[in-house]
Amino acid sequence: MYWSTVLNPFFRHVDREYENLSVAEKKALDEEMEEEAEPWFIPFPFTTKSVSQPPYKGSDPQWQQFIQLSKDKEAQQQIRSHLSQVVKGAVERHPAITARCGGPVKIRRYWLDIDFPSRPPPVFYSSGLLMQGDGLYWSTQQVDSFAVKRLEKILWPQAMAVSTWAFTSTLVKQHFMGISRALGFESSKPAQPFPPVQGGNIQQKTERPLPSANRQTPDGTPAENASHNVSKTADPRQTDEPESGGKTNFVRDTAISHIEGMKQITEGPVREFRKKLSQTWSPPRQHPPRGCVLVSGFVECDLPKAMVLIDVWGFWDPRTKTFDSSSTFMNLRRIQLKRQAPARG
């Protein structure tokens, strides 16, 4: 299936393009292909497998480096300080944190542990077509772990599926509650804790006669009819303009009303979708190189307006004396404001 729908049309297109080239272009292309001795590997989907590596041996150079590092306390402290500076730089470059908490950034404290892995990270292999200068072969090659993780995010979007389920369940629950209220199984208005009081004073106030035009004010002028005043001030929204008239766009008004209605209906489900997506989604992470040391813990940064706590996982490579940037990742745990205003009710 993959051959007939993807590879076969691709190879036919390459052959047609090659036939359309001139003699000089074909010669130049052949010479370039001869110079490029590196093979071209096309992996097939759903053929990737993870292979666990055997534990380190005492004679391995990586294990010997672990022993040297475990005895060097000064080097361990330098590694911790280096990782804290990496976190500080990441906080300084984060626009949302600096805009909310200000600058400059200072390191208040950190707690970082150094762990020596007992075995290397797993290796991923994938099967596919290997194109070399002398032909086309079926082969199994080692592939990058980051590409494998990213492909898993595409083929199995777990975070998107869970978030979509949260959206759908919230929407169904909302419609079910609306139908229940419409059928009278659930009251849409909360019941009053006490019944209204029917006292005699209220009845006496309601039975008093309204002011009449025959009554006079103390200066001798007749009083205005109260009923007339009530009719004028009953609806302050009334104007002298006619109630109807002018031009209206029925299609536009109907579309706008439907859009507003959909916004109100989906406001709660969309909020649940975003909440669940932020909880379950994480970027693909690459495995560290062989022989790296795990440095993990937290770093607390002091900013003018808040304290920022960052969880960090770094992988120190003893060969390069640096942290592997592709596998190091951080997570914002908490922002504690130094001055907090009361919440608005």
Image (cartoon, rainbow, N blue to C red):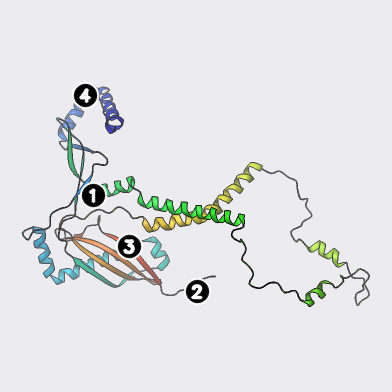
Which of the two residues, 74 or 138, is positioned nearer the viewer here? Answer: 138
Q: Is residue 195 above or below residue 274?
A: below
**Separation of disc 1 and disc 4 at Cα?**
41 Å
- Which amino acid does the dot numbered 1 rest on? Ser
Read off the residue under disc 4: 24
The N terminus sits in image quarter: top left
* Extreme residue in the left direction: 59
Q: Residue at x 32, y 66 (%)?
A: 310
**Separation of disc 3 and disc 2 at Cα?**
27 Å
Q: Nearer the viewer, mark 4 or mark 3?
A: 3
**Separation of disc 4 and disc 3 at Cα?**
57 Å
**Separation of disc 2 and disc 4 at Cα?**
78 Å
Quadrant in which residue 321 is drawn: bottom left
User: Which tag, 2 or 1, sits closer to the chain's start?
Assistant: 1
**Separation of disc 3 and disc 1 at Cα?**
21 Å
User: Which tag, 3 or 1, sits closer to the chain's start?
Assistant: 1
Q: Which mark is residue 331?
A: 3
User: Which tag, 4 or 3, sits closer to the chain's start?
Assistant: 4
User: Which tag, 1 or 4, sits closer to the chain's start?
Assistant: 4
In the picture provided, is 242 more to the left or to the right than 79? right
**Mark 2: which secondary structure?**
loop
In the rendering, at what x and y percent does residue 53 appear?
15, 53
Read off the residue under disc 2: 342
**Mark 4: which secondary structure?**
helix
Read off the residue under disc 1: 145
